[in-house]
Amino acid sequence: MPGATKSDYSLVRDGNITSSNSLVKWANYYNIINQCNLLLDRSHIALENDPAYTVTQDSIYHAQARGGRDMMHFYLIRIWKDVPYITTSFYDDTRNRDVAASSQMDILNACIADLEAIQSQGILPFSYSSSSGDRHLNKGQVTMYMLKALLADMYRVKGSYETDRQASQDAYRK
């Protein structure tokens, strides 16, 4: 990898994985998480000031942001195991950015619970376009199909992480 030093490889080999290592860049994941959190924390401003922005649109955007945030946390725990679990936005220097790592299973369980809540609300559409000519509108969108596929993958991974046989089988069944 360009810019990597012998020291960077040694740190990874020894299990010392930090965001300052040129081989390990988790900043992109946390940038997306922060963008999702910014929307969740501040979309009420658009609702108050833009009459064209509806409560229904806001609800869909919130569900998409939560789904995207959960997906990024899922990727992080699969790559690095225990990582900081961030559910608030950082938009200025007044918030403490030093967040301790949470356990892989705690994050996975929180993400599963959040996705199940989104699913039960029934806010997300299965498609953003019903026309075959407009299928490109679905790309990059969190749909109910995407949410269900992500949940299935999370349960599969949870089943492999569980140490209790019954809990593992329950996760696989879900």
Image (cartoon, rainbow, N blue to C red):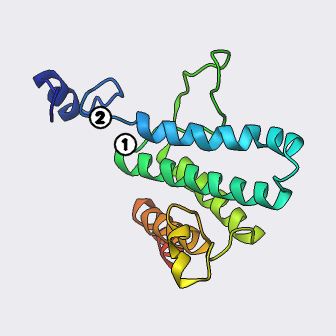
Residue visible at 76% across and 43% down in the picture: 43
Q: Is residue 133 visible?
A: yes
- Which circle, 1 or 2, is nearer the viewer? 2
> On the rendered structure, is 86 left or right of 16?
right
Of 130 and 62, the residue lying toward us? 130
Residue with the most extreme left position: 6
Residue 50 x/y as whole percent = 84, 45
- Secondary structure at badge 2 equals loop
Residue drawn at the location 10% of the way across and 24% of the way down: 6
Residue behind mark 2: 24
Q: How crowded is mark 1: few (under 14 residues within 10 Å), some or many (20 or more)?
A: some
Q: Where does residue 9 sit, x and y in percent of width and height?
A: 15, 30
Residue 106 image point, x, y percent = 56, 48
Q: Which amino acid does label 2 sit on?
A: Val
- Say what secondary structure mark 1 lies in: helix
Taking the image as shown, residue 58 lies to the left or right of residue 72, namely right
The residue wearing badge 1 is 80
